[in-house]
Amino acid sequence: MLKVLSCVRCGFCGFDKIGDYFGPLGLRLLLAYEFWDAGVMKYKGENWFADIAEKFPFPFNVIPVDVSWALVTWFELLGAIALVLGLATRFFSFSLMILTVVAIVSVHAGHGYTISEGGWKLPLMYLVMFLPLLLSGPGKLSLDQLIVKMTSKA
């Protein structure tokens, strides 16, 4: 029995090595797609932040809505690009997490939990997906990792 468990454990060891590369990459790509899509919609669309500005938590409620709109749009677009590249991953993960919390409070909280009703379930999933990127980094297939390797050799 111990021999079987040892073989099974050894077989899964390869997943650990693969996971260091592809686990975080999968999270980064999925989150990048979602935030890119949201950023493009804002870039091409009308500013609707004036309709919900009173729901923004402090300090975001004191920033003019045009400035907020521009900040959110560009953080979503640049953050998506950075996530794809794995560049400044922790910074953009944290920034997009703050943006997501503000969206939950301002947009989704009044619609319940379910996605079909515009609730906060999907943004909550994004927050949970950002946690490994924030806490463990972008993984080995990233510019962040390449920069660390290049600077540690110098």
Image: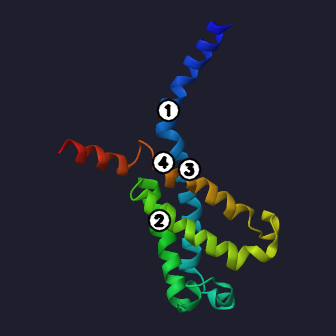
Q: Report the front residue among 64 and 131.
A: 131
- Marks 2 and 1, Cα distance to the nearest angstrom? 25 Å
Q: Amino acid at mark 4?
A: Ser
Mark before the other along the chain sequence, 4 or 2: 2
Q: Amino acid at mark 2?
A: Gly
In what element is the residue under mark 3? helix
The nearer-to-camera label among 4 and 1 is 4
Q: Which residue is mark 3?
A: 27
Residue that appears at 57% across and 54% down? 131
Mark before the other along the chain sequence, 3 or 1: 1
Residue that appears at 58% across and 66% down? 37
User: Is residue 106 toward the left or the right of residue 58 in the image?
Assistant: right
Q: Which residue is mark 1?
A: 18
Q: Which mark is residue 138?
A: none
Q: Report the front residue among 110 and 6.
A: 6
User: Is residue 5 toward the left or the right of residue 92 in the image?
Assistant: right
Residue that appears at 60% across and 87% down? 47
Q: Which residue is mark 4?
A: 136
Asked if the residue under mark 4 is in contact with the one under mark 3, i.e. CB atoms within 8 Å, the reply is no
- Marks 3 and 1, Cα distance to the nearest angstrom? 14 Å
Q: Which residue is mark 2?
A: 79
Asked if the residue under mark 3 is in contact with the one under mark 2, i.e. CB atoms within 8 Å, the reply is no
Report the colour scheme: rainbow
Mark before the other along the chain sequence, 4 or 1: 1
Is 67 situated above or below 83? below
Mark before the other along the chain sequence, 2 or 3: 3
Residue that appears at 23% across and 48% down? 151
Q: Report the front residue among 44 and 81.
A: 81
Within 10 Å of disc 2 (Cα), the crowding (few <14, some 14-19, many 20+) is: many
**Could you tell me residue 146's position as x and y percent?**
32, 46
